[in-house]
Image (cartoon, rainbow, N blue to C red):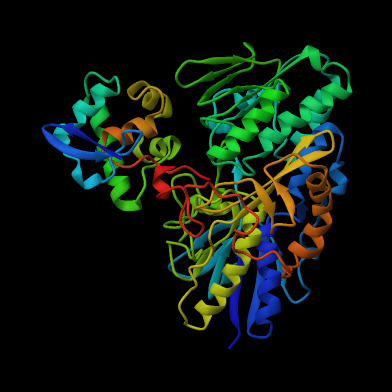
Amino acid sequence: MIQQVVILGGGTAGTLTANRLQRETGGQTAITVVDRDNDHWYQPGLLFVPFGRARPGKIVRSRAQQLRPEIGYRQSPVEHVDVAGRRVHLENGAVLPYDVLVIATGAALLPGETDGLAEAMAQGKAFTFYEPAGAAALRDALAAFDGGRITVNVVDMPIKCPVAPIEFSLLADWYFRRRGIRDRVELTLVTPLDGAFTRPVASRELGGLLQAKGIGLVTEFNTGEVDADGRRLVSFDGREVGFDLAVVVPVHGGQAYVGRSPGLGDALGFVPADERTLQSKASPDIFVIGDAADLRSSKAGSVAHFEGEVLVRNIRSFLAGKPLAESYDGHANCFIESGFGKALLIDFNYDTEPLPGRFPGRAGLPLLKESRLNHLGKLGFQQFYWHVLLPGRDMPGLAAAMPRAGKHFPATADAGTVLTGSPRDE
Amino acid sequence: MSTKVYAGTEVTVNDDGFFADARQWREEMAPEIAREAGIGTLTPQHWQVVKFMRHEYAEKGTGPSVRALSKTSGVSVKELYQLFPKGPAKLAAKIAGIPKPRGCI
């Protein structure tokens, strides 16, 4: 019997899952992908739009065309998931029954969660580069900016690509140096974290890089209000940081349909799942991949990529009535563009924080260190994204599990043991 | 890891002062932990949040983030900051005797 697999979301996670699953189970499954539009954005490219280094039209393609021809594509927003009835109701009235459902609808930006942010964005005082129109508007605002305070603010965690605000700050430094007016621009990164990044070694390195470039860092700042008229951010505990132009990463949540689907999501609309098998906690026939999940792994394309291999194996096991592999290790891998044609690379998982060394082995790219090679890697990644990652192909030397060879582990820690203690101590 | 004495009982805490084992916590310890953290009196609203933190931890194995805490408990984020200045999620977790909420990596 043909088994019905419905995949909600035709972004990075949904597309690579659909293609890999179709290739491995073609003939036994009928796969349908659902998304509300047909614009598949290469999201890492959005970072470059404000600096005129990527054109929006060059980083978007058809969602449907990234799928293998055997895969069905439905274009409609999701109304809700009937978890008990194993059916998805679409806003266009269609009802899709499923044997397995994959939630891959990513994270939504919620500027309305922060007092004054939507108004400040409407008035052209605050911008976000996390969506295409915002990134293009910010490009024009930066081009017209000839001095003053630019404040980059992460309102709350979790966010997609936690390194992007650091990259934005570093690229802004480079941008204004090239324009010859860096001395007239005060750059500050304002974050709710207690350092530049979530984990200690990388946080120290990246914090040092910001300092070396004269970029201010304000930590443990939980933004309660964006005051457009007063041109200041106000934290819940009453601290203030001024700005002439604010670059804000709004609060993230799950998509609205999750909230309309009883039993599916948590208070923020993310979908709780087992962090090793990716099976949802709502029901055994529902799996979650990518930014839509309530996992402590980073919300990043590389995470969706590494999860994809485990997810497809587990969907096949589930359909065959076999036990699931508990093998997703939280692996993430991110290039960090630092300007001047250089970039850093970090590679980490649930248990091992980003460490210096080389990736994926001793002769690989330098980790946690600026290099020209990493910058070329980041540039080349776009072709790799469309032609290798989305088709869900295996890559020699790049497996789902985090490689340990090439990394410099601290002397106190045994290779092979957990470095950072229990996750809850983080 | 080290030990502390609250309400006459020795408990194990980690380097940041969070309970290593939530089962060692008793209600009468909460006011002492709160005082150490600069909260003189625990009002009924503080208790509502503290009990909610215990409940969430028992259900999910980790304390909620401030935003999730607000959405589920019905106490606004602003009020949470008034009740537990400098970080409601961490402070309420400490007073409730549960481990530090795990953030994302």
Side of A416 relative to A63 (left or right): left
Where is residue B30 shown, x and y percent of the image?
20, 31
Side of A244 relative to A220 (left or right): right
- Residue lying farthest left? B8
Please indicate, yes or no, whether residue A291 appears anywhere in the rendered image. Answer: yes
Query: Split into 4 quadrants, where in the image is the N terminus of chain B?
Result: top left
Kindly identify the residue that appears in the image at 51 percent across and 21 percent down: A235
Side of B34 relative to A325 (left or right): left
- Residue lying farthest bottom? A1
Please indicate, yes or no, whether residue A9 appears anywhere in the rendered image. Answer: no
Instruction: Work out whether A327 lies above or below A137.
Output: below
Where is residue A306 shown, x and y percent of the image?
63, 61
Where is residue A171 shown, x and y percent of the image?
78, 31
- Count of residue discs: 0
Kindly identify the residue that appears in the image at 42 percent across and 24 percent down: B78
Instruction: Work out whether A148 lies above or below A317.
Output: above
Q: Nearer the viewer, residue A53 or B82?
A: A53
Q: Nearer the viewer, residue A381 or B84?
A: A381
Q: Nearer the viewer, residue B54 or A37?
A: B54
Kindly identify the residue that appears in the image at 84 percent across and 38 percent down: A341
Quadrant of residue A20 in the image?
bottom right
Q: Nearer the viewer, residue B2 or A230?
A: B2
Instruction: Work out whether A43 lies above or below A397.
Output: above
Kindly identify the residue that appears in the image at 84 percent across and 43 percent down: A56
Where is residue A89 shown, x and y percent of the image?
56, 63
- Residue lying farthest front? A411
